[in-house]
Image: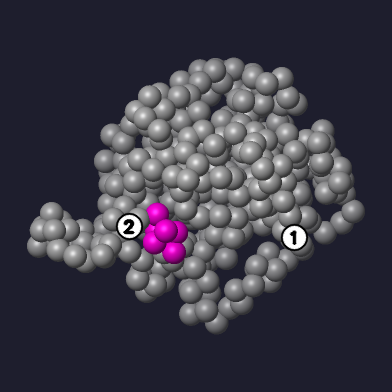
Amino acid sequence: MSEEDFDKKDHHGEPNPVINALSNAVAAMRADDDQLALAKAHESLHPKAIEKLDVPEARRQPTAADAVKTLLRQQGRPTEPEQLVPGVRSHDTTLDGAAGSLPARIFTPEGSGPFPVIVYFHGGGWVIADKDVYDAGARGLAAQARAVVVSVDYRQAPEHRFPAAWDDALAAYRWTLQHAASIQGDPARVALAGESAGGNLAMATAIAACEAGLQRPVHVLSVYPVTQTSLNTESYLENAIAKPLNRAMVKWFVDHLVRSPEDLKDTRLQLIDADLKGLPPVTIVNARLDPLRSDGAKLLDALEDAGVEVERREYEGVAHEFFGAAAVLEKARQAQAFAAERLRASFGN
C-alpha cells in the first residue's frame, strides 16, 4: 500500500507500515546495537506519526525519555534520575520570561559553590516536550561540567508563535545573570546550552545577548541544532524517514511555529546568516542518523568564517535525541563527556 493510499483511510496518525518497515530496515544497517535497542523500546510504546496529529495529541505521544525508561526496565535497572545521575539535586521553580513567569528546573551539583551556570533550553520543535522530557541531558551536564543548570520551559507554538520562545530564552538568560548568586552560581561564568530547537535557542540567545549589550556567555553548547530553514540539505534527504525525527515532522513543527513565510528568513531561525562575529567558543554535537546533521555542519562553517572558536563532533550510529540517553547509549556518554570538557575549559574549571 502506498503512503498516499494508506493516508486516505482513517488510521488516526498510525505510521505508514511500508515507510515504517523501510525506516527500521535502514536503521538496522546503520545504527549501533544500543541505539537499535532504544529504537525498539520506543516502537514498543506505539508512537503515532507526529506529522499526522493535532498538537494536543502530538504532545501526548511517547517520548525519547519514555523509551529510555522502558529499556532500563527491560534491563532490570533503576529509572529514577537521581540514581542514574548521582551527585546532582534538582528543584522546580519559576523565573521571569518575556511575558510572565516560566517554569524552570534547577540542577545543582554537590558542594557549596559558587558553581558556573548553564542556561539550558529543551528540544521539541518549539511545539512539544518540556523540561521533564529533557531532564537527563540537563542533569548530565550539571554532573559532568560541575555547573548549576537552569532548564527553562519557554512558551511554545502554536499558542505562542515565533518569536515568543526566543524572547523567553533571552529573558531567562537575563534572569540568570541577575539571580545566579542566589542559586549557588557564579554570575561571571554563565553559558548557554540546548538540544534541537533548544540548540537553536542557545545560539540565538548568545547573538541576542551580544546585540543587547548584555554580558557575553562564556560558551555555547548546541546539540543537533536547527540552524537554517531549507528542508533540502544532504542530511534531510538522506534521513527523510529516520526515527525519531524525520523530514515531515520538521515541516509540521515549522508550520505550527511561523506566522508567515517571511519568518523563515529571520536570522533567529536562519542562524547561518546571522552576524556571528564576537561570539564565545561554541561546541556543536551532531548525530549521523539525523535530518539536522547538515544544519550543524553549516553552522560550523559559518562560525569559522566569522572567526569564532568552534569544535563540532558527529557521532556515528546514533540518531536525533541520543544526547540525553546516556543511561543506555555509549555514544551519549561520550558526547556528554566531550561537551562537559569544552564547557569546563571555558569556565576555567
Measuring from the top left, give residue 138's x and y in whole percent.
64, 53
* Residue 349 shown in magenta: no
Task: Please tell me which residue is depicted at 69% across the width and 55% down the height of the picture.
Answer: 105
> Dot 1 surroundings within 10 Å: few (below 14), some, or many (20 or more)?
few
**Residue 244: which quarter of the image?**
bottom left
- SS for dot 1: strand
**Residue 96: which quarter of the image?**
top right
Task: Please tell me which residue is depicted at 51% across the width and 21% down the height of the picture.
Answer: 274
Instruction: Provide the residue designation for mark 2.
Output: 53
Q: Can residue 69 be seen in this view?
A: yes
Q: Which residue type does callout 2 highlight? A: Leu
Measuring from the top left, give residue 59's x and y in whole percent.
44, 59
> Dot 2 surroundings within 10 Å: few (below 14), some, or many (20 or more)?
some
Which numbered disc flags the more N-terminal residue, 2 or 1? 2
Read off the magenta span.
55-60
Q: Which residue type does callout 1 highlight? A: His
